[in-house]
Image: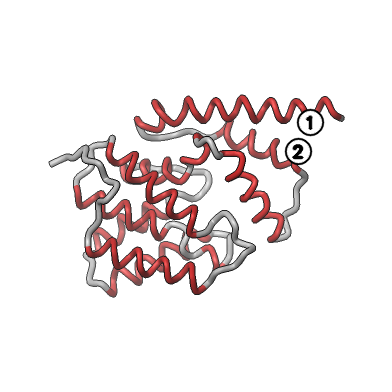
Amino acid sequence: MTTRINLKDFSTPLIEKTKEYVNGLFANNFSEDICYHNIDHTLDVVEGVKIIASKSNVNLKDLETLIIAAWFHDSGYFMGSENHEFASANLASSFLSEKGVDLETVIKVRNCILCTCIPQKPVTLLEKIICDADMFHLASENFFQKTELLRLELTLSGKKMTHGEWLEKSRNFIESHNYHTKYGLQVLNPKKNENLVLLRSKIEEISLLG
């Protein structure tokens, strides 16, 4: 059976336990240097998953799987930014196994987390949903604030770039990025393209200033 319900308040006991556990991970490993891949981004992705899933044909069990994967998808970032998706998937696997979750669900959660690696190559509908949710900010009104937080995070980790260099890098990323779900293509993509136009304009302004 499929659903198109409002998922704003959707939850299950396992989601609540996941939420508590992941919130604890972020709180116990808090660092001001991680100013993008933090609990705020995780909350954004959880909400993005709910929005996209509400417009997609997924059953309630898969909704639970998606939301759990969204909570865990960057949970291992504090262990190191490189390949953090694998650390996140391992944290999810250990947690879910301890809770007695069936292997099929654990594998689905792992796959959803791992497919958020860049470049994204989702295969299943669930993987496509979480990938689009992870890039929801590209189509948001606060895109430039979000991307500046990412630049700051990279700078604090030693990967320094000028403002102009970062805008160029962001433009290249958006131009090569593709949404995967029907919602992403029909709703998010036009908004992303609006941000891309603004981004190109900012780059042009910097170029004219020399």
Q: For this view, does 68 lie left or right of residue 162?
A: left
Residue under the point 37% across and 65% down: 92
Q: Position of residue 40 (x, y in %)?
A: 49, 55
Disc 2 to disc 1, how far (Cα)?
A: 7 Å
Say above or below: 168 vs 32. above
Residue under the point 21% across and 37% down: 4
Label 2–label 1 contact, CB within 8 A: yes
Q: Nearer the viewer, residue 15 or 165?
A: 15
| Residue type, label 2 | Gly
Quarter the N terminus occupies: top left
Q: For this view, does 174 lie left or right of residue 21?
A: right
Dot 2 corresponds to which residue?
Answer: 164
SS label for mark 1: helix
Say above or below: 127 vs 87. above
Residue under the point 56% across and 33% down: 176
Q: Where, by quadrant of the figure, is residue 13 drawn?
A: bottom left
